Image (spheres, helix red, strand yellow):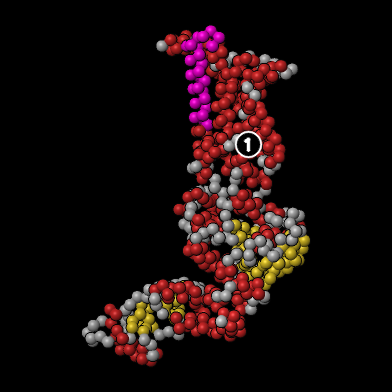
């Protein structure tokens, strides 16, 4: 999709090139995250793809066509561009902001109207409520949503995002990240995403390009970046809590227990006791006819007088997780609500599985065992030094 | 009371003077808008030429109006004419308009321009559809200052043959005719206030609601007194 070949950017007033000898291939439908310390050349690289910055050497191809041989305006109309400061036009309504590129492309108003509504829905804003607002009436998160909608207006196959969520607070940032990931499952764009935050890179990226001093240091999947850092720079940049970061990579869908036994409110108390005995469980999840989670009952609380309804002993789960939540989300919820199991539900709110602290611990444990073995010699040395 | 009597008695003359006054300002401001907004746009990306232009504007501003008209008067081909009067007004409005256009265009958040470029807008489209509309409140402020100044400066154009409200002032002073002076002063002030009000109305109509709030403050306060 996007192919960079020995790309270089040299500024005359600077001794070292901002980007040097950069070659990489970004595949269609992937999110490629450029990450590195400030001044590493990640933003420069991004802006060379849509020619906001002209490379001084090398070639950039999009779908096999050399970008430098194309009309830059025409090229940019086909590449979505989102920046940290968003750059919404303050004198235009949300509608007119989103309509910018479609108008450049000569769409008729009817088509623009349809597309704008569709996009606003897609980014989670009510069209009727927000279409006629001016940017100064929107919150930071809403502005960035409009910014993303505007970049996607003409349905460009490629999106360039330069620290798109850098200016919003952490809670909204996490929300926007999740929304973008959900969106990406539907729209399958090729996204180049710049950030300086390795956690964001691990969360968002199908591939991560770590840059330093204008060079590409490692270009790999997040898993390989975490488990097989190419050199000490990457290792240090990724941080020493790599095992915890792995939690950000895995979705609860991959570790949850799926063959769970459930009870139905129509079941008799004997049915439930039999199920509990058979599966040696301490609790049983209760779902309704449509397999939607209803609650759970504890084994020891079922010792009730025969005439009493067991339904009264059903407890509600404090929280549920969507299939695409990460293990880190799961762990955080568990700590927050002081619980050891969380049900996982699919899009239709049906029970998909259960993720437990035990399962999480075994994942973290495995990762930490490796870590301990690897770090052991170093630890000894430092101890001796301390003594 | 005498003033009112004077006003009634001389209403024909005052009416003619007022029309002349208004038409002079109208021609002056139209020429100024076309000329100085173009100049402001032309120098927007070049701080060197901008400084030169603004320097000239400041210099002209510092020349007393009477002497400026005196100079214009002796230029062959101009002399005692409406052309001289208009040129004088246009020269005086150079600084406020060029300065505000220049500053407004350069004061726009660069990320807005970057986003516009990143979406593939042409330079000309960015200027007309993004930069100028956003700069409008500050440009308006400059034009307002220029206009109100023109109303006053126009009174001095009577020295080069204009028949406007300035006559009431100059003749009134010569003859110590206080009714005449007061009538002239009140009429000139009334025109200034009216013009300012009209500009405010136009601004509310033309400036997008998205940038209206707060823009007035920065336009009349910050920019007007920021000398270059």
Please, which residue is most extreme toward the top here? B175
Above or below, comparing residue A132 to residue A9 in the picture: above
Please, which residue is most extreme toward the bottom here? A278
Above or below, comparing residue A24 to residue B87 in the picture: below
In front: B31, or B139? B139
Q: Quadrant of the C terminus of chain A?
A: bottom right
Q: Chain of mark 1?
A: B
> Can residue B191 be spotted in the picture?
yes
Residue B131 figure quarter: top right
> Can residue A158 be spotted in the picture?
no
Element marked by disc 1: loop
Question: Is A181 a magenta residue?
Answer: no
Where does label 1 land, which residue? B228
In terms of secondary structure, what is the magenta stretch mainly? helix
Is B77 on the left or on the right of A243, as rendered? right
The image position of residue A76, as x and y in percent, is 67, 56
Above or below, comparing residue A296 to residue B33 in the picture: below
The image position of residue B18, as x and y in percent, is 54, 18
Q: Which residues are magenta?
A: B173-199
- Residue found at x 38% / y 87%: A281
- Residue found at x 56% / y 69%: A199
Crowd rating for badge 1 (residues with CA inside 10 Å; few <14, some 14–19, many 20+): few
Question: Is B193 a magenta residue?
Answer: yes
Is A137 on the left or on the right of B53, as rendered? left
Residue A280 figure quarter: bottom left
- Residue found at x 54% / y 68%: A181
The image position of residue B222, as x and y in percent, is 54, 38
Q: Quadrant of the N terminus of chain A?
A: bottom right
Is A379 on the left or on the right of A335, as rendered? right
């Amino acid at each position: 999709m996007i192919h960079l070949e020995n790309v270089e950017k040299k500024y005359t007033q600077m001794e070292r090139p901002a980007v040097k000898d950069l070659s990489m291939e970004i595949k269609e439908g992937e999110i490629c995250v450029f990450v590195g310390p400030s001044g590493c050349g990640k933003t420069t690289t991004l802006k060379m793809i849509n020619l906001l910055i002209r490379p001084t050497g090398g070639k950039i191809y999009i779908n096999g066509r050399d970008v430098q041989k194309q009309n830059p305006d025409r090229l940019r109309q086909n590449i979505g561009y989102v920046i940290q400061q968003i750059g919404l036009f303050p004198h235009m309504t949300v509608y007119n902001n989103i309509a910018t590129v479609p108008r450049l492309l000569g769409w008729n108003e009817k088509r623009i109207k349809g597309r704008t509504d569709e996009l606003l829905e897609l980014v989670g804003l009510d069209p009727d409520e927000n279409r006629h607002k001016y940017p100064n009436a929107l919150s930071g998160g809403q502005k960035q949503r409009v910014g993303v909608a505007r970049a996607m207006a003409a349905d460009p196959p490629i999106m360039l995002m330069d620290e798109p969520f850098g200016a919003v607070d952490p809670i909204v940032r996490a929300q926007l990240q999740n929304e973008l990931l959900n969106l990406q499952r539907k729209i399958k764009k090729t996204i180049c995403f710049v950030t300086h935050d390795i956690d964001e890179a691990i969360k968002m990226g199908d591939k991560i390009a770590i840059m330093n001093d204008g060079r590409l240091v490692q270009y790999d999947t997040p898993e390989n970046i975490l488990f097989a850092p190419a050199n000490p720079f990457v290792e240090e940049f990724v941080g020493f809590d790599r095992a915890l970061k792995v939690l950000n990579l895995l979705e609860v869908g991959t570790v949850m227990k799926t063959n769970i036994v459930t009870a139905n409110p129509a079941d008799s108390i004997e049915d439930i006791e039999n199920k509990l005995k058979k599966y040696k469980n301490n609790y049983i999840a209760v779902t309704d006819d449509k397999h939607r989670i209803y609650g759970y009952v504890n084994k020891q609380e079922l010792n009730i007088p025969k005439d009493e309804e067991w339904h009264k002993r059903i407890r509600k789960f404090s929280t549920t997780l969507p299939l695409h939540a990460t293990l880190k989300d799961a762990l955080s919820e568990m700590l927050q609500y002081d619980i050891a199991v969380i049900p996982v539900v699919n899009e239709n709110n049906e029970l998909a599985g259960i993720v437990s602290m035990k399962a999480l611990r075994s994942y973290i444990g495995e990762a930490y065992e490796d870590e301990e073995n690897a770090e052991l010699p170093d630890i000894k040395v430092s101890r001796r030094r301390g003594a | 009371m005498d003033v009112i009597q004077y006003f009634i008695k001389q209403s024909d003359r005052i009416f003619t003077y007022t029309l002349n006054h208004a038409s002079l300002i109208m021609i002056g401001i139209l020429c100024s808008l076309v000329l100085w907004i173009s100049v402001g746009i032309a120098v927007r990306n070049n701080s060197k030429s901008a400084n030169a232009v603004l320097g000239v504007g400041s210099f002209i501003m510092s020349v007393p109006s009477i002497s400026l008209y005196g100079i214009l008067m002796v230029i062959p081909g101009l002399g005692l004419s409406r052309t001289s009067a208009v040129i004088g007004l246009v020269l005086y409005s150079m600084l406020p308009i060029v300065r505000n256009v220049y500053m407004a265009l350069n004061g726009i958040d660069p990320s807005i321009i970057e986003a516009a470029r990143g979406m593939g807008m042409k330079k000309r489209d960015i200027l007309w559809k993004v930069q100028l509309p956003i700069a409008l409140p500050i440009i308006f402020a400059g034009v307002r200052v220029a206009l109100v100044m023109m109303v006053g400066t126009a009174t001095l154009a009577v020295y080069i043959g204009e028949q406007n409200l300035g006559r009431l002032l100059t003749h009134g002073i010569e003859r110590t005719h206080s009714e005449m002076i007061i009538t002239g002063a009140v009429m000139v002030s009334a025109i200034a206030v009216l013009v300012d009000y009209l500009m405010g109305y136009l601004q509310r109509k033309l400036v997008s609601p998205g940038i209206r709030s707060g823009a007035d403050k920065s336009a009349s306060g910050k920019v007007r007194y920021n000398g270059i």
